[in-house]
Image (tube, rainbow, N blue to C red):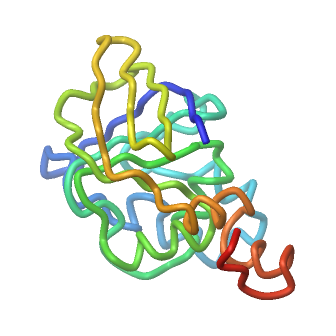
Amino acid sequence: MILKGKTHRFKTPAGTDHDINTDYIISGRYKFQCEDNNELATHVMEDLDPNFYANIEKGDFIVAGKNFGCGSSREQAPIAIIYAGISAVIAKSFARIFFRNGFNKGLPLIECDTDRIDPADKLEIDLERGVINNLTKKEEIKFSAIPPLMLTLLNDGGMIEHFKKNKGFNIDG
C-alpha cells in the first residue's frame, strides 16, 4: 500500500506538536451535534487551525510529535480525519486508545521520528516496506512496517468493514 500527499503540522497553545488530544482533533462541541461524518470532517483540527479543512487535499498527511490522540476515547477523532481525506497520521507516538481506534476505523498510523518532516513536505509512504520517502528533501525515513494483518484491516476499511466483508474475522487476509 503506497500513500502520497503533503504534510500538515500543528502547534498546541503550549507551542508544541506533542499531546494533540482528541478535543483538538474534533472538538467536543461537534461530537453529538454532527451525525453526518462528512460534516464532522469539516471541523477536523479547527481549534488549532480554523482553515485546515479548506487547505487539505485528498491523500494528505497529519504529522505530529509525541502522544497524538491523547484525551478521551472518542471514535469521532479518527473518523473525522478519515472523512476529511487524510490518508495517514505520522507521529513519534500515539495514545494507546487512539492507536486502536485508528486502525479499527481504517486509518493508517505510522510511528517514527518526525523531526525532519516539515509542513507542506511531499511524502510517499510504503506501508508494507516501512519507508517514508520525503520527496521534498530527498530523504528516506524508516519505520516499523505495518504487519500484514493490520494492512488487511486497513485495505478493508477497518475492523467492522473487515467483519462484514469476511462474515467474521479472517486472520489469513
Which residue of the protein is positioned furthest toward the bottom in this rendering?
Answer: 168
Q: Is residue 8 above or below residue 161?
A: above
- Residue 43 horizontal/vertical position (percent): 57, 52
Q: Is residue 37 above or below residue 65?
A: below
Q: Residue at x 86, y 73 (%)?
A: 165
Q: Residue at x 78, y 81 (%)?
A: 163
Image-based side of 139 in relation to 28, left or right: left
Position of the N terminus, as image quadrant, is top right
- Residue 100 horizontal/vertical position (percent): 46, 76
Q: In the picture, residue 155 is in which quadrant? A: bottom right
Position of the C terminus, as image quadrant, is bottom right
Q: Is residue 60 above or below residue 165?
A: above
Image-based side of 26 in relation to 156, left or right: left
- Nearer to us in this view, 115 or 143: 143
Image-based side of 109 in relation to 144, left or right: right
Q: Residue at x 40, y 21 (%)?
A: 120
- Nearer to us in this view, 18 or 32: 18
- Nearer to us in this view, 25 or 95: 95
Q: Is residue 18 above or below residue 161?
A: above
Q: How many marks?
A: 0
Q: Residue at x 32, y 11 (%)?
A: 138
- Nearer to us in this view, 17 or 113: 113
Image-based side of 137 in relation to 55, left or right: left
Q: In the picture, residue 8 is in which quadrant? A: top left
- Residue 93 horizontal/vertical position (percent): 25, 59
Q: In the picture, residue 22 is in which quadrant? A: bottom left
